[in-house]
Amino acid sequence: MFHSLGLEAAAAPEAEIQRAPAAARPGPPCLPDTPSLLCSPELSRPQDRDSAAERSPVPCPEQPEHWGQAGACTLFAGGHEDPVQLAMLILSCSSKLQLLEGVLRQGLPKTLPVHGSIMNINRGNPSSYEVLVDSWPDFKAVLVRPRKEVVTDNSDVFTNMHAAFYRDLGAYRALLDSPGAINWGHTIYIIGLQDGLYEASRDVAKAKGVQVNWQCYFTFFHPDPSTMPDIRLDPTMKLSSLNASHVDLLNATWAYGGNEQSRQYLARLIRSFPSTCLLDATGCPISWNITDQFGTTGHGYTLPKYRSHGYNSIVAIVTAKRLHAQGYPSFGYTSLDNYPMQRLQVSHGFRLLPSLSYFINHHPTPRTVPS
Ligand SMILES: CC(C)(COP(=O)(O)OP(=O)(O)OC[C@H]1O[C@@H](n2cnc3c(N)ncnc32)[C@H](O)[C@@H]1OP(=O)(O)O)[C@@H](O)C(=O)NCCC(=O)NCCS
């Protein structure tokens, strides 16, 4: 259905929507992630950790000291007499992540990609993402990023997708600029629905010798997919979900596909997130969509000879209803000139959001030194 830059999303199979296997899910609540450089306890002042713990509204009974370990970090930077206060906390306690999800839900639709990502993190974290905030509990900026161990290729933008939301642009800038928040030696995207995200990236990246450019997309959001009509299925078609045998077809037809990185990315999406497709009598997919790590519905596609028969409408409705039944908002991105997809969204009750979605690409120049 919709597509978002190098990423799209959408999904909803006939059978049960499959999410990540239990083995891929995070550990017990409140276990700290591997401490980052910033948050390593030896670089933190105990008094900062304690005061942060007192401010935390959600206790972590399983491991009360966790907030201190992952939180309020103070780095004594080399050459500085005074400690540098870092505007970055890695939020890994499940109670706090659930609280954050609820707060971001109240901010929908502006919080969409970050909210969807945190929903996925809280439901098995199949893409191995982690959450950075500037402070807690009164956070003013949130950045979600893949954990460093899953990014094995620094040019793989499909894996290296981030999403951001801010209440305070200054706090977001500071979060971006915090040592370790962004790997400036990687080519990455940051997605968000707010003005100012690009300017923040541009300004922070400039000092690091990293080039920044952006694309924008329309965002369509459905306020209540339960009101969408029931589908009428052509008896020659079968409603199903995508599987590994369909990856090559998707990679060959996707506007951003055609290479090994995109093929592996599509394979991961199909494995980890809901997808919907219509199969012809021979079992070949003729129309489909997939949901991604941000909860976006995308990759909408119908084979050319089957277009204008209502097939992607069926896929879109099935996906939206299933996401809705699981508590996920239903949204997706559409290129500014993709009129067929825009009409399709509007005809099914999706609303065009007033703000554009920004896909901000950061790519290091050859002389960039990651910091
Ligand atoms: C966009 C795309 C997915 C639409 O797929 P589709 O299966 O043709 O979609 P539908 O048939 O449900 O709807 C398309 C049109 O057919 C019309 N239609 C639906 N059922 C029909 C029928 N039985 N007879 C004739 N027309 C019909 C719809 O009203 C719609 O008309 P509109 O474009 O004037 O609004 C398809 O064109 C495509 O794959 N495009 C390339 C990839 C792409 O752009 N993907 C979207 C990325 S965001």
Image (tube, helix red, strand yellow):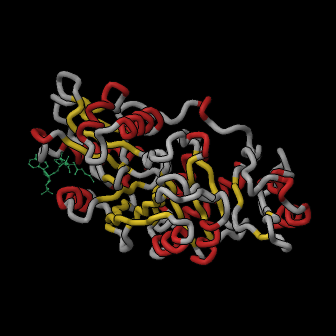
324 and 66: which one is in front? 66
Q: Residue shown at 91%/65% (left/top)?
A: 47
Q: Residue shown at 29%/59% (left/top)?
A: 334
Q: Position of residue 108 (x, y in %)?
A: 49, 65
Q: Position of residue 149 (x, y in %)?
A: 61, 40
Q: Position of residue 177 (x, y in %)?
A: 62, 67
Tell me which corner region of the image, top left, top right, bottom left or bottom right, holds residue 139. bottom right
Q: How many marks?
A: 0
In the picture provided, is 35 more to the left or to the right than 213? right
In the picture provided, is 325 more to the left or to the right than 220? right
Q: Is residue 270 above or below residue 164?
A: above
In the picture provided, is 253 more to the left or to the right than 152? left
Tell me which corner region of the image, top left, top right, bottom left or bottom right, holds residue 44. bottom right
Q: Is residue 285 above or below residue 164?
A: above
Q: Residue furthest front?
A: 367
Q: Residue furthest top?
A: 282
299 and 363: which one is in front? 363
Tell me which corner region of the image, top left, top right, bottom left or bottom right, holds residue 225. bottom left
Whether residue 12 appears in this view of the structure is no
14 and 64: which one is in front? 64
Q: Residue shown at 16%/35% (left/top)?
A: 234
Q: Is residue 203 above or below residue 231?
A: below
Whether residue 60 appears in this view of the structure is yes
Q: Residue shown at 61%/78% (left/top)?
A: 170
Q: Is residue 315 above or below residue 59?
A: above
